[in-house]
Amino acid sequence: MMRWIVLLCTLFLTLNAESFRVYSEYNPPFNYKNADGNVEGPSVWLLQELFRKTGQTIVDGQINVVPWSRGYHEVLEHPRTVLFSAARTQEREALFAWVGPIGKLRIGVIAKKERHVNLQALRGHNLGKIGTVHDSGAEQLLLKEGFTLEDFDRFSNIDSQLRKLREDRLDAVAFSVDAMFYTLQATGCSLDAYEIVSLLRENDLYFAFHKDTDPALIERLNQTLKAIRP
């Protein structure tokens, strides 16, 4: 009897299996590449466990680490894709199918303490003095506060932002606070030299699937996630 139950469960998973193209970015401590070039972090482990328990697979068994803007638009436009870790915001709510939450994100603006940066004083100067990542949650929040794209120096990744900040070629950088501090520390910077100028928002992080993903699968993934991390 037990053998038949196992066979039926295996058949169910096989019939309901899909293969997803998976996109991520460098967003420590949630997901990042280790010294060997492999993608790791708690978000990576959670996705692998979710797929293992629900019978889903990753195309080529590979997580594609790409600039945020590219991954964002790939999942917007192509079925059977997923992006992580993504902040679930009001602006994005209808754009994706969501599985989570899988963590907490603090979106903010940091600067060197010695520069005594006033965020609002940077608005409207059109000098590109705030480093941002294309299409990031930080950009969207600053735009809602009255900033324009002309106020930003836009990059495809966090490393470019922070290098300019270290070299005093930017007044401030807007992104995930924890990812920025993690990266600065990893490059040998003293975190005592930096401060949070403005905490724009705290968001839950999710796996963002293409919006046309089967709702029944999204529900099953969410229920499985609750069992993994109640």
Image: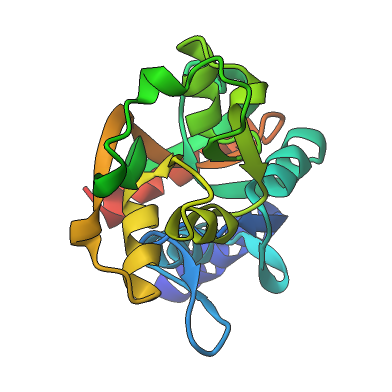
Query: In this view of the protein, which residue sits in the foreground, 125 or 215?
Result: 125
Query: In this view of the protein, which residue sits in the foreground, 91 or 142?
Result: 142
* Image coloring type: rainbow
Seen in the image, is 19 located left or right of residue 51?
Answer: right
Q: Residue at x 63, y 22 (%)?
A: 126
Q: Residue furthest right?
A: 78
Q: Which quadrant would residue 115 be assigned to in this image? A: top left
Image vertical order of residue 7 relative to residue 78, above or below: below
Percent coordinates x, y for residue 74 in the rendering: 77, 44
Seen in the image, is 201 located left or right of residue 36?
Answer: left
Q: Residue at x 26, y 47 (%)?
A: 114
Seen in the image, is 192 located left or right of residue 85?
Answer: left
Q: Residue at x 42, y 67 (%)?
A: 45
Query: In this view of the protein, which residue sits in the foreground, 165 or 137?
Result: 165
Image vertical order of residue 9 relative to residue 123, above or below: below
The answer to whether residue 103 of the structure is visible from this angle is no
Q: Residue furthest left?
A: 192
Image vertical order of residue 21 relative to residue 155, above or below: below
Q: Residue at x 70, y 54 (%)?
A: 18
Percent coordinates x, y for residue 73 in the rendering: 75, 38
Percent coordinates x, y for residue 50 in the rendering: 46, 58
The answer to whether residue 112 of the structure is visible from this angle is yes
Q: Which quadrant would residue 159 be assigned to in this image? A: bottom right
Question: Which quarter of the rendering shows the N terminus?
Answer: bottom left
> How many numbered circles are shown?
0
Percent coordinates x, y for residue 151 in the rendering: 59, 25
Query: In this view of the protein, which residue sits in the foreground, 25 or 120?
Result: 120
Seen in the image, is 177 located left or right of residue 37?
Answer: left
